[in-house]
Amino acid sequence: MSREKGAGLLIVLFAVCMSFLTTANAKADSSQITVIPDKAGAKVSVIIADTSMSGQNVSVVCYAPGWGGDTNDWNANRGYISYIGQVKVSGTTTVSFPVKGGVQSGNYTLVLGYTGGKISKPFSFDGGGGAIVSISAPNSVKAVQTAAKKVKVTWNKVSGAAGYNVYRSTKKFGTYSKVGTASKASFTDKKIKAGKTYYYKVAASNGSNQSDAAKVTVMKQPKIKVKSAKHSAKVSWKKDGSASGYRVYMSAKKKGKFKVAAVVKGKKKVKATVKKLKSGKTYYFKVSAYKEVGKKKIAGKASAVKNVRIK
């Protein structure tokens, strides 16, 4: 078979498989599916004893560790597919397949799909014995902005977890991409953008069960206007729904040291007047939103610097 025909067949097969995986069915029973990993042979055997699948063509998709969990996104997940195929189920059926790319450390996910249903089954080659690993999803996941360019994600420890993988998306039901790993029950994301909303999920590194999504909206970078008045400057900006208040900074030099000239409490108040300034002198201003986290005030990204000559 030519490479072009092989690739076309794989895409068609994937499309057929995905059509089976789009709808959940209460008849699907994961306890009737047995996964037997063979580390030495770099292959997997699956025993299907679920009677609801009998007589059907069942799709078999095996995802490698690091998979984001979306069975409907071909482009995002094709790099993690270790095996894809179909089997005709008749009574108790066994299907065996090699693992593409060799055995990796971490948790694989087997997805069996048939008309109207699907079953997901995590397993691992780790530990040498090839036992099936079923690690609970972390709970109490929280995401909080802790600095202008940082979001801290925390969760409860999971028994049996070798570590944790953290996934992020800009949509709650979108595609989640892995953004980091952690050995403890916390992770700091340093690659965030002002004004963006993020959703985070966490899974044990040796388990595929992902947590519920935790949402955080990063404070915006304000856009400010500065007007001159008699011995004063009037600074204004647009409100930030994720902020607790704002700080106005001022300096007598563009590249000088900026000091807090005013603190505005409440996200709806969007202006401040800085008084007792020298007439004819130029001052430089910038504004940052802040969020109260416990007893701390976390500052967001500061605005661009604006200057004004005082009347």
Image (cartoon, rainbow, N blue to C red):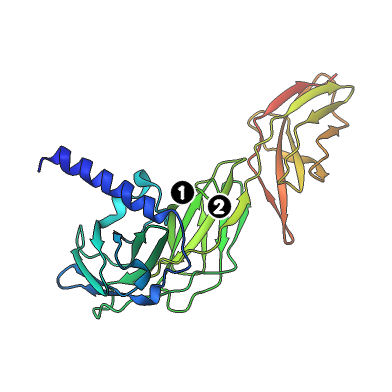
**Dot 1 lies on which element?**
loop
* Image position, residue 60 (x, y; %): 29, 60
SS at badge 2: strand
Q: Residue at x 75, y 33 (%)?
A: 238
Left or right of 115? Residue 57 is left
Q: Earlier in the sequence, mark 1 or mark 2?
A: 1
Q: Quadrant of residue 140?
A: bottom right
Report whether 265 appears left or right of 17.
Answer: right
- Please state, as top left, top right, bottom left or bottom right, where the C terminus lies in the image: top right
Residue at the spot x=22%, y=65% of the render? Answer: 103
Name the residue beneath numbered marker 2: 199
Callout 2 crowding tier (Cα within 10 Å): few <14, some 14–19, many ≥20: many
Q: CA distance from mark 1 to mark 2?
A: 10 Å
Whole-percent x, y for residue 77 in the image: 35, 50
Kindly give the residue lying farthest to the front in the view shown. 55
Residue 292: image x %, image y %?
73, 54
Place of residue 97 in the rendered image (x, y in percent of width and height, measured from the top left) = 19, 64
Mark 1 Cα-neighbour bin, 10 Å: few <14, some 14–19, many ≥20: some
Residue at left offset 10%, top offset 40%:
2
Q: Residue at x 82, y 34 (%)?
A: 271
The one nearer the camera, 105 or 7, is 7
Amino acid carrying mark 1 in the image: Thr
Dot 1 corresponds to which residue? 175
Q: Which mark is residue 128?
A: none
What's under tag 2, amino acid-wise?
Answer: Tyr
Please tell me whether residue 77 is drawn above or below residue 257 in the rendered image. Answer: below
Q: Are marks 1 and 2 in contact (CB under 8 Å)?
A: no
> Front-most of 179 and 110?
110
Q: What number of labels is visible?
A: 2
Mark toward the viewer: 1 or 2: 1
Quadrant in the picture for the N terminus: top left
The answer to whether residue 171 is above or below residue 302 is below
